[in-house]
Image (cartoon, grey):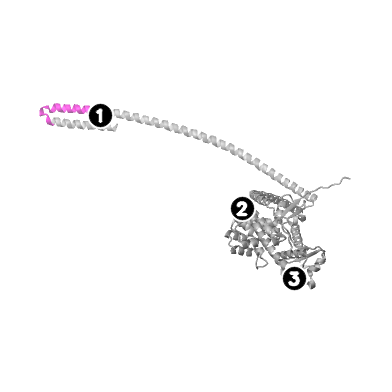
């Protein structure tokens, strides 16, 4: 609006300027008319400026009116919005007030119920205490005693759970390994059935009659002295009817004396010269037997390429016993067992069989050479150029050297199997009785055990427990503890089976 006024003014100024120039350029004659024209123009410009001014003022008033209306409308809308917000707030305040009243009522109710609960709790505690007192009177137990009983029950339950866990763990751990081991060992034992001859340090020679005893003794004992000097064996002639006892620790010398004496008895001519002849002949026969037995052992086991002296040493084992077990038969059996197990496991069968056959070779000369038979056998194997694997297996078969090969472990296991099976070896009566007594003593030392019986020549101990003291689960732990104590305190060949038995019986009599 103001801009239009300025435009009008500018136009008027322009008109004045134009008129000025017109007046200047027009002659004096036309000044009058020019002035009139200029006045007219000025007047028109004024009229236009006034008209525009009015238009601008009208437009300005219209704009102000429009802006005022718009402002009033917006202001009215804002007031309406504020009123609506106020109404909402008032409504929310009313709702909060009502909820607050409800919460207060609920709080009052809860407080009341809490008091009721506290009262009931006090009543229950009083009743509980009264019941405890009544139970104590009825049972005759104090609270502390009852607590101890409860703890004992919980402990028993824990032991039962532990026993069950032990069962499961043992079953899972041993299932595969034991099954495979049993299959291999059972298969090996079934295929091996070597005979074992129980030899002692004496041999008995039967006589046709008691008169032969005098002929054996000879005049002033010259015959018996000659026989003893040539064989290095003691000849015992006592009141035993029709028998002479040959005693000595060297089994080969004892065999020479037995053969020589049998030949002399069969020939009937007994004198020092004849005795010397028969002893020489018996020695040659025994040497031949030794050689044949050694060769037969190598043929039976399929072990070839042994040094001739090693074969002779093997044959000497025929006359050697250990705990009543023939050492040559034992060596052959160990060779069989080790070879069969090696075949099952994919190990070197030849090495296992060879080492099994030679593992006790040191016993052939242990009466002549100082030292344990393991060391003697190892030295002999080195002397006669056996392989390192065989030498190692011989050195490790009693655990003196840690086994480094699977063949050494198999020889060790086969040796234990052959020696430990029932009937393979014989103990002295005193040692046998002590072992049985020790087994029963260890078994009886555990709480809950009523009786124990060592059976199967000490290979098994059966233990009867008190059923009122033990449970079916706790006997598993008892068996494990007994086994552990036996392993710590006893020495025995093979293994001992611990069998714990719990039996509950109820007996009544009808009258």
Checking the image for residue 49, the label placed there is 1
Residue 74 percent across, percent down from the top left = 42, 32
Q: Secondary structure at mark 2?
A: helix
Q: Earlier in the sequence, mark 3 or mark 2?
A: 3
Mark 1 or mark 3, which is nearer to you?
A: 3
Q: Is residue 184 positioned above or below 98 on the image?
A: below
| Quadrant containing the C terminus in the rendered view | top right
Q: Earlier in the sequence, mark 1 or mark 3?
A: 1
* Mark 3 surroundings: few (<14), some (14-19) or many (≥20) residues within 10 A: some
> In this picture, which residue range is highlighted in magenta?
24-50
Q: Nearer the viewer, residue 490 or 450?
A: 490
Checking the image for residue 272, the label placed there is 3
Res 110 seen here: yes
Q: Nearer the viewer, residue 199 or 18?
A: 199
| Quadrant containing the N terminus in the rendered view | top left
- 451 left or right of 58 in image: right
Checking the image for residue 342, the label placed there is 2
- 457 left or right of 176 in image: right
* Mark 2 surroundings: few (<14), some (14-19) or many (≥20) residues within 10 A: many
Q: Nearer the viewer, residue 375 or 255?
A: 255
Task: Please give the name of the residue rendered at 70% of the width and 57% of the height, measured from the top-left corner.
Answer: 420
Task: Please give the name of the residue rendered at 23% of the width and 32% of the height, measured from the top-left corner.
Answer: 9
Residue 221 percent across, percent down from the top left = 78, 72
Measured in 3D between alpha carbons, the distance from the residue under mark 1 to the one under mark 3, in whole angstroms, is 185 Å
Q: Nearer the viewer, residue 215 or 141?
A: 215
Q: Main secondary structure of the magenta part?
A: helix
Q: Secondary structure at mark 1?
A: helix
The image quarter in which residue 39 lies: top left
């Amino acid at each position: 609006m103001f801009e239009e006024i300025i435009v009008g003014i500018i136009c008027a100024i322009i008109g004045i300027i134009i008129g000025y120039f017109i007046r200047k350029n027009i002659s004096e004659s036309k000044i009058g008319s020019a002035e009139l024209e200029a006045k007219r123009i000025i007047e028109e410009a004024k009229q236009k400026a006034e008209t525009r001014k009015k238009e601008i003022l009208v437009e300005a008033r219209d704009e102000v009116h429009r802006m005022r209306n718009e402002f009033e409308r917006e202001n009215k809308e804002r007031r309406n919005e504020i009123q609506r917000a106020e109404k909402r707030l008032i409504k929310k305040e009313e709702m909060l007030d009502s909820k607050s009243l409800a919460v207060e009522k609920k709080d009052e109710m809860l407080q009341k119920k809490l008091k009721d609960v506290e009262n009931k709790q006090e009543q229950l505690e009083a009743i509980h205490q009264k019941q405890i007192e009544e139970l104590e009177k009825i049972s005759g137990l104090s609270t502390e005693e009852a607590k101890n009983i409860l703890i004992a029950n919980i402990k028993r339950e824990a032991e039962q759970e532990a026993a069950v866990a032990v069962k499961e763990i043992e079953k899972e751990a041993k299932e595969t390994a034991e099954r495979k081991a049993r299959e291999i060992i059972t298969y090996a034992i079934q295929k091996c059935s070597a005979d074992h001859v129980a030899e002692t340090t004496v041999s008995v020679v039967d006589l046709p009659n008691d008169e032969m005893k005098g002929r054996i003794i000879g005049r002033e004992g010259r015959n018996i002295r000659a026989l003893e000097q040539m064989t290095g064996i003691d000849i015992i002639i006592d009141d035993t009817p029709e028998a002479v006892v040959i005693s000595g620790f060297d089994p080969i010398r004892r065999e020479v004396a037995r053969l020589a004496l049998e030949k002399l008895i069969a020939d009937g001519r007994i004198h020092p010269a004849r005795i010397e002849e028969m002893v020489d002949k018996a020695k040659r026969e025994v040497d031949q037997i030794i050689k044949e037995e050694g060769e037969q052992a190598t043929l039976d086991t399929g072990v070839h390429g042994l040094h001739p002296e090693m074969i002779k040493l093997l044959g000497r084992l025929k006359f050697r016993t250990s705990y009543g077990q023939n050492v040559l038969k034992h060596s052959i059996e160990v060779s069989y067992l080790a070879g069969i197990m090696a075949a099952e496991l994919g190990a070197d069968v030849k090495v296992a069989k060879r080492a099994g056959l030679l593992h006790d070779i040191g016993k052939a000369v242990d009466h002549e050479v100082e030292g344990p038979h393991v060391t003697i056998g190892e030295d002999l194997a080195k002397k006669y150029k056996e392989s390192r694997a065989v030498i190692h297996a011989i050195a490790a078969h009693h655990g003196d050297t840690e086994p480094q090969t699977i063949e050494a472990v198999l020889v060790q296991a086969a040796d234990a199997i052959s020696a430990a099976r029932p009937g393979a070896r014989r103990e002295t009566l005193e040692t046998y009785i002590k072992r049985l007594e020790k087994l029963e003593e260890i078994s009886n030392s555990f709480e809950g055990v009523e009786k124990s019986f060592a059976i199967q020549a000490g290979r098994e101990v059966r233990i009867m427990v008190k059923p009122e003291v033990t449970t079916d689960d706790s006997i598993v732990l008892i068996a494990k503890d007994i086994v552990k104590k036996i392993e710590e305190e006893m020495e025995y060949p093979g293994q001992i089976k611990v069998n714990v038995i719990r039996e509950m019986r109820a007996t009544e009599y009808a009258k």
